[in-house]
Amino acid sequence: MRDVAIVSFAQTPSLRRERDKDEVEMLAPLLGEVIERSGIPRKEIGFTVSGSSDYLTGRPFSFVIALDAVGAWPPIEESHVEMDGAFALHEAWVRLQHGDIDVALVYAFGKSSLGSLRDVLVTQLDPYYTAPLWPDAISLAALQARALLDAGLCTEREMAQIAARNRAKARQNPFAQLRGDFDVEALLASPYLVSPLRKHDCPPISDGAAAVVLAAGDRARKAVSRPAWIRGIDHRIEPHSLGVRDLCRSPSTTLAARKAGVLGASVDVAELHAPFSHQEVILRNALDLGPNVDINPSGGALAAHPMMVAGLLRLGEAASRILDGRAKRAVAHATSGPCLQQNLVCLMEGDP
Amino acid sequence: MNERCAVIGIGQTKHTTKRDDLSLAGLVREAALRALADAELSFADIDAVVIGKAPDMFEGVMMPELYLADALGAVGKPMLRVHTAGSVGGSTAIVAANLVRAGVHERVLTVAFEKQSESDAMWALSPKYPFQPPLLAGAGGYFAPLVRAYIRRSGAPLDVGMLVAVKDRQNALKNPYAHLHLPDISLETVKASPMLWDPIRYLETCPSSDGAVAMVLASEAHAAKAPRAPAWVRGTAMRSEPTMFAGRDQVNPRAGIDCAKDLYRQAGITDPRREIDVAEIYVPFSWFEPMWMENLGFSPVNEGWKMTAEGATAMSGDLPVNPSGGVLSTNPIGASGMLRFAEAALQVRGQAGEHQIAGATVALGHAYGGGSQFFSMWIVGSEKP
């Protein structure tokens, strides 16, 4: 495979409700920032790809108008996935393997606040047998958490500790939405939202956007002093029907990690896309992360969770720690679908 | 690292107004199983699945690939969902081909579908944007002014659109999968049909269809083992431009011109009219045939209508266009682009049945979307590039 690296990353603050800006207004300054930070002139971008969802915006073709933020003139080679931006990044990585272009721009945007998110996500489910029952997103996650507790794989206290730790780390992240010091006993004394999940076990509802510039080989080396090289990237999907899955495990994460060369590799940092506290336990097990790995130094998805963006944020946050020398090797993970149905894993490394 | 890629399996559903005998999963599975059977493979032989469709609102399922993973044998595999407006069927095939050409996967299943009977496409195609008056006129209302501009610029006779409408429906009679089979189609019936969006009459518009199409794309090593002749991918291209800005030429968009140029360069084509044997292009409203003939470089600007009028685009002409019957005869929107790509591949494999163009060795597949702003194209050939 051709060497491809993340050479720059930018994000908007994650907000409970972005009232002032539409998607184009969120993206336009962000794309300018990520391109400027890469040191690569805009005209060198050979491929542009984005991730977003019409169902968040509540109208078809929401990505079409977002193209106004890119400045697609003269016309550009461009694509879009109706998925998290992390999967758009995978498409860009594939495109850069062809060797005829050296630079790609990836972006994602999502305004989760525009509808009732936990209900909107019901429309992701099997439309004949599951969606008509309207099991909302938090209830499905609660089902998974209950399975995990019953199997003895975690406790409600561990879940509260995970929530507290992520939000404490988020104090260092100016873009995070939920941050601060939380007392685990106080968290455990709070009522259930959907048993066994309490409010702190759930992600915030966030509006936000993120962007990444990828560059290949020498172009990446010329652009920045310490590119975040993608050593492996892979994604896998599981059955949709919850009844045929073991909700306590994430075999698709393990498989993607194996394909990406993560299993057995020693990493300093892991950015895990775990919107619900108990999912961090599942992912840690699936990735076989050791005790010395710094998990979610950004605060993770429990601190900021713009839909369609939160996965790309994990890749960007992991890369930024390599770009600035804080980490040597990092793993980033992104998820999509109910109860971690689909998972992407990426191993990144800085030059020694 | 640019591996060769070939189409080794093609399958499609019978397209119709309402496939109420099938669920969404059943619809995509029917096409996928036919493509696998054509390649003499099973789901177990597939490395990755790339699926495309137009807006999720057409069926009311958000990111339906999550639900369709089981039906498409994608479990344990990478699955990617593409959405690039009307060009999506073409873009999806290109994203799938890119996986093979990058050397990431060896055999990729790509599927595109739409089950338009689940909703009202007119509504779903009329998005309301802030600070803009709602159009509420569907795609026809958007494109009719562009057609009028084309007629004014080119001085084309007013019956050219009707000629396309008749030709494509007559071609569709030779395609058992086509949605519309109108044996009585004639200039008189088209002329007698109601005017919907002047100058576009009812019979000059595409139908609203339920349908799916699938292809198996393979590396050179696997193409060599394929039971039937492969269609080699000789070039792919995508281009996008913004919906509107002052001075934008929406009749002959630059994104389409640039996309075709890039495509021909990759395929080593210098004289497309002479070197391409057959073209499957995205013509949802009759007049887009002459418009795209110019945009694709088959004809000088303002003279594309002459190709239609002279019969050059008929099955007996020097550049047959849409022998399958095209979008005018079959339009499951998200699948329409991939149907063009797949029909081009059928032609160079010699598998197009009654609508086969004899001796076709090089074929163009073309799709466009949005406000004539997204383009995806490929050239396939019977000869290994």
Image (cartoon, rainbow, N blue to C red):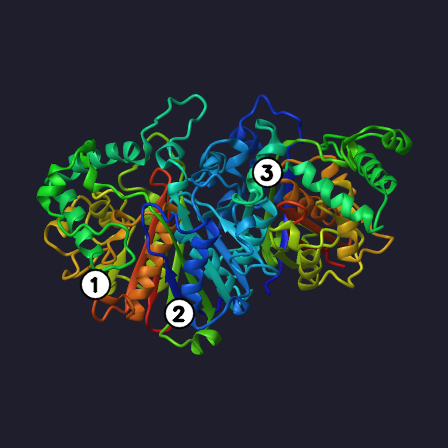
Q: A33 and A336: which one is in front?
A: A336
The chain holding disc 2 is B
Residue B101 - label: none
Labels 1 and 3 in the same subunit: no
Instruction: Name the amino acid, label 2.
Output: Asp
What is the CA distance from the residue labelled 1 to the residue labelled 3? 58 Å
Q: Are marks 1 and 3 in contact (CB under 8 Å)?
A: no
Q: A19 and A183: which one is in front?
A: A183
Instruction: Name the amino acid, label 1.
Output: Arg
Label 3 element class: helix
Question: What residue is pinned by disc 3?
Answer: A133
Instruction: Give the mark toward the camera: 2 or 3.
Output: 3
Quarter of the image that includes the C terminus of chain B: bottom left
Label 2 element class: helix
Residue B274 - label: 1
Against A57, residue A74 (above or below) is below
Q: Quadrant of residue A309?
A: top right
Label 1 element class: helix
Instruction: Name the amino acid, label 3.
Output: Leu
Instruction: Give the mark toward the camera: 1 or 3.
Output: 3
Q: B105 and B183: which one is in front?
A: B183
- Residue at image position (47%, 56%) is B95
Q: Residues within 10 Å of mark 3 (few under 14, many from 20)?
A: few
Locate residue B369 relative to residue A80 in the image: left or right: left
